[in-house]
Image (spheres, rainbow, N blue to C red):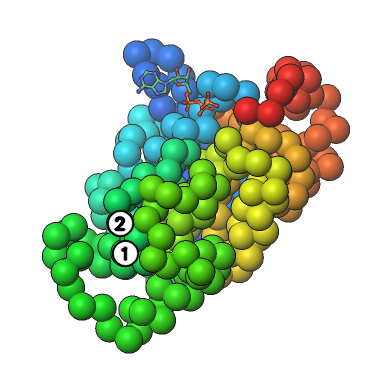
Amino acid sequence: MHIPDKSKHSSLVLTVEGVDKSFDGFKAINDLNFYLEEGELRTVIGPNGAGKSTFMDLITARTKPDKGKIVFHKSDAENIDLTHVREHKVSQLGIGRKFQNPTVYRSHTVYDNLKLSLAGERGLLHSLFYKESKEDREKIYDVMKTIRLEDSADIMAGALSHGQKQWLEIGMLLAQDPRIMLVDEPAAGMSDEETERTGELLLSLRGKHSLIVIEHDMEFVRQIASRVTVLHQGHVLKEGTFEFVKSDPQVIEVYLGRQTRKH
Ligand SMILES: Nc1ncnc2c1ncn2[C@@H]1O[C@H](COP(=O)(O)OP(=O)(O)OP(=O)(O)O)[C@@H](O)[C@H]1O
């Protein structure tokens, strides 16, 4: 396998190069090139059907590409070709994904949800009954603080607001110390205040984690974005600062000009 020359991009954590993926002859991903720096928060936008979810599926090995490479730069010496790794192994490598709809355990407390995530592979039953160490407890409280649910440790997850459930699920990812976090439309269905808090949360994770956030809500993108990738027909149409992509005629033509409402 050809490994990208990291001396040119000394702090890359993920390289996606020349990736194609077709479904029944339809090219959902078409010669996709994408580079993520360590600690970066990248926002990915694009019209419906642009290939955003498929892109996430490819990184997490849920879907295998027809061609191209997807490399996780675990360390200078360890570059892992994710196209040859199984999905559950990808998450063990430290690449975590949060889907659009929260999937917390509704009849368990906030604390126990985080405890379950911390336990990871140990299995649900074992995880519920295992006695967490002092370090585990500190970790759980750290995460609760980060997601601003430290006062809700004993609340059943099912009783949380939609926004709080989303934060808890982000916390459940954090409990597993991911190097790369993939976050799918975190602000969907949130109030303006929750949306802003979510932005603050994601911004606070920059540096400690590398994040790819798919989002439609342009106000939210404005809040969190330093670098934005615009996907269109499975390919990177434009990439740059929020101001750059927002005023790009092609981006306006294929995406922004067609946006009539907040999704
Ligand atoms: N498993 C599949 N089988 C067939 N076609 C698929 C499959 N997954 C995705 N596609 C097609 O690939 C294209 C890209 O879909 P994808 O869901 O990745 O786009 P998206 O940018 O995430 O869209 P949205 O914003 O609507 O979620 C779409 O035309 C979709 O219908």
Point out residue 173 in the picture as x, y percentages from the top left corner.
41, 58
Q: Residue sitting at 35 percent across and 60 percent down? A: 109
Query: What is the three-letter code of the residue carrying label 2?
Result: His
What residue is at 82 percent from the left and 40 percent from the top? 244
Q: Is residue 173 visible?
A: no
Residue 169, compared with residue 187, is above or below; it is: below
Question: What is the crowding at mark 2: few (fewer than 14 residues within 10 Å), some, or many (at least 20)?
Answer: some
Residue 49 in the image: x percent, y percent?
Answer: 53, 21
Q: Which residue is tagged 2?
A: 108
Q: Quadrant of residue 231?
A: top right
Side of 242 relative to 70 (left or right): right
Residue 216 sits above or below residue 260 on the image? below
Circle 1 packing at 10 Å, graded few (<14), some (14-19), many (20+), is: many
The quadrant where residue 222 appears: top right
Pick whichever, 154 or 102, lies toward us.
154
Q: Residue at x 18, y 73 (%)?
A: 130
Mark 1 = which residue?
112
Amino acid type, residue under disc 1 in the picture: Asp
